[in-house]
Amino acid sequence: MQLHPVTVHPSSDALAREDQLAWKIASVATDPVEVEDAVTDMVINRVIDNAAVAAASLTRDPVVAARAQALAHPVSRGGAGATVFGAFPEARASVEWAAWANGVAVRELDFHDTFLAAEYSHPGDNIPALIAVAQHAGQERGLTGRDLVRGIATGYEIQVDLVKAISLHRHKIDHVAHLGPSAAAGIGTLLGLDTETVFQAIGQALHTTTATRQSRKGEISTWKAYAPAFAGKMAVEAVDRSMRGQTSPTPIYEGEDGVIAWLLDGPDAAYSVPLPAPGEAKRGILDTYTKEHSAEYQAQAWIDLARRLHAAHPELADADRVQSVLISTSHHTHVVIGSGANDPQKYDPYASRETLDHSIPYIFTVALQDGAWHHVDSYAPERAARPDTVALWRRTTTEEDPEWTRRYHSLDPAEKAFGGRVTITLTDGTRIVDEIAVADAHPLGARPFAREQYVQKFRTLADGVLEPGEIDRFLAAAERLPELSAGEFSALTITARPGLLDSVVVPKGLF
């Protein structure tokens, strides 16, 4: 990896394009380096993972609305269009709207992969836009599954590298500001575009995807699922414009009125962004990890610890026997999903599902009492409002522990951690103390996810949503991803079982 210094420059400097971060990202995207076998295998895993969580969300309101929007936009000229999760493969939509609908389906349950460093991210959000573009333009441009794998590898690499170096949340900017550039770069790799074109697309994608983090604060709305889908849609549109010769604000990162100077660390900012050297394989996806549970990633390890404590100490399920629960964890976990956020909604039994999956006091309480976690049942209104749960929930707080903050930010994968220590004090004075560093499904966890677990996750979440034959068909196509021809890209979708989508009310909008 090469470290690239990134600072703000006045317009009078006339910063050369080759010295701009957007150009360096574009150069990585256009480097024709081969994809390693381990990366290819993980790309297949994540395509399966995305389809799994999309299947489980097909009848949820945000996904129903987004699918309706997409299907209201028929195939545009210049390509074959793209498939929409849930609908028949023949029901194609315009490429950017298919990317939108499928992005919402993937993101809705907060159940796919993650990478956490200086910033948060869900790198799997790159995949819907890339598959949509491959389906739309694949035959005309002679693409293969190997091209799609290369594009996805680029999307992951760029997002991981930006997340390692540049914090957005510190300045209350939503994390999808890293997704627009990474998706644009990935599409550039997929289509075999030149560096200049990819450079312009990256700049436009970044410029149109910077927004505040209010979407993840207080009462969290349905927009949380739409935010990354919007970034993917903007990336598709940015690539289209750049292919037509249209240019972007330059320099988008380093300009005196650019993103860094006014939205991030300011005129005196200094970042060091790691990117692969020329000829170096893109391995960023191997640094990422998926979720076993449908909840914000920083809650994954805490669910596993709560399940363990439930089995070892059944008395903890009795709220009357627990005086207090103190979770000592990293700064990020404390202030984003813990009591340090100072959001009363995190303790509200009538809060939205989106809010509850960003409340570690709620999640830990329910997992401790139930000894399990379910993507639907654990968020049910009657479950959240159960009196004994509410009582224990409101006696559960978080605090920052500097050592867990240090481990959260560690660059050493062996000590990087997303957990912490819990101290449970019983009413008789007994104290139970335990800790966990990473989730069980993490590569260094108790039960790391491999292909078998990704396939099982898909089968579990698709059960009752897809026909058994459709489950087998999709898995067979996904596992052949590198060998697919352009004419087979339409196999990378899922079709709901007969009657399922007829059971939901489709909202009427403008389109």
Image (cartoon, grey):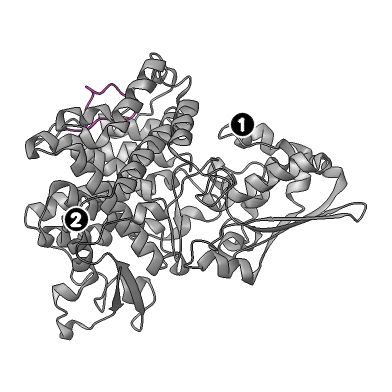
Rendered position, 83 above or below 196: above
Q: State the residue in front, 355 or 103.
A: 103
Magenta range is 81-94
Question: Of callouts 1 and 2, which one flags the residue occurring earlier in the amino acid sequence?
Answer: 2
Q: State the image coordinates of residue 91 (x, y, percent, origin top left).
A: 23, 23
- Does the magenta run of residues contain 87? yes
Instruction: Please check the rendered image and state whether residue 478 is part of the magenta-colored stretch, yes or no.
Output: no
- Cβ atoms under marks 1 and 2 closer than 8 Å: no
Image quadrant occupied by the N terminus: bottom left
Above/below status of 173 relative to 180: below
Residue 377 tag number = 1
- Going 29% across and 28% down the picture, which residue do you hit? 477
**Quarter holding residue 482:** top left
Q: Is residue 287 left or right of residue 445?
A: left
Residue at the disc numbered 2: 33
Q: Residue, x 34% and y 57% (percent of image)?
A: 159
